[in-house]
Amino acid sequence: LPSISSGFLSKLESLRVSCCPELSNVLLPFNLLQRLQGLRILEVFDCQSLEQVFDFETDHQGLVDEKHKLGHDDQQLQLLSSLRELKLYKLPRLKHLFNCHGGRLVQLHNLLVIRITECHSLKNLFRPFVAPSLQKLKQLLVYSSMVSAWGAFPSIGHRWNK
């Protein structure tokens, strides 16, 4: 995607990827994620080889350099902060949503809806550092998947069970 300008990507609000059997490993690497500042809806359907949606570590060493080059500090660079809906369907090899240990970069505070269907290899939705930013989550639907939802969201599960 180097030929697509950053300006275009920053205005993109909805991204739907479907029926891409050859799409492998990672859907959105760090260098693309940092340009998708306005992304509100992400839908991924029927990508048989996809193992991970978001990748923050492939450029892990370059992460600090990239932040400084773009004029960002940890507080300013908040990836996925506009995302409102995440829908994942028929991704049989999907193992992780994130592979990141840098929780300060992932801000899902506007995420309202998560729908996961037939993602049989996905065991946990989010790493623990992501759960605190899910304060606006209104809908979590998991069908025909082996996801441990309450294990991924212990504080939310506790709050919803009161």
Image: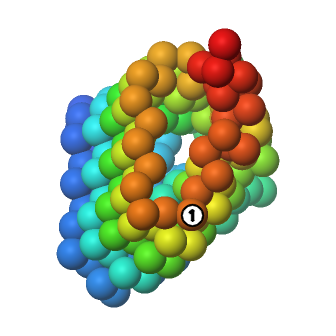
Mark 1 element type: loop
Is 10 left, or right, of 67 in this rendering? left
Q: Quadrant of the C terminus?
A: top right
Nearest the viewer among 103 and 2 is: 103
Instruction: Name which residue type carries label 1.
Output: Met
Q: Is residue 93 above or below residue 87?
A: below
Q: Nearer the viewer, residue 76 or 42?
A: 42
Q: Is residue 19 visible?
A: yes
Is residue 140 depicted above or below 162 in this figure? Answer: below
Please state, as top left, top right, bottom left or bottom right, where the N terminus lies in the image: bottom left
Instruction: Residue at 49% x, 63% y: name it.
Output: 145
* Visible residue check, residue 27: no
Q: Is residue 45 above or below residue 121?
A: above
In this figure, which residue is indicated by the disc labeled 1?
146
Percent across and percent down for residue 142 are 44, 50
Other-residue count near label 1 (Cα within 10 Å), few / some / many at <14 / 14–19 / ≥20: some
Q: Position of residue 33 (x, y in %)?
A: 47, 47
* Residue situated furthest bottom in the rendering: 22
Quarter residue 8 falls in: top left
- Left/right of residue 55 with respect to residue 50 in the rendered view: right
Residue at 40 percent across and 55 percent down: it is: 143
Q: Nearer the viewer, residue 6 or 157?
A: 157
Residue at image coords 70%, 51%: 100
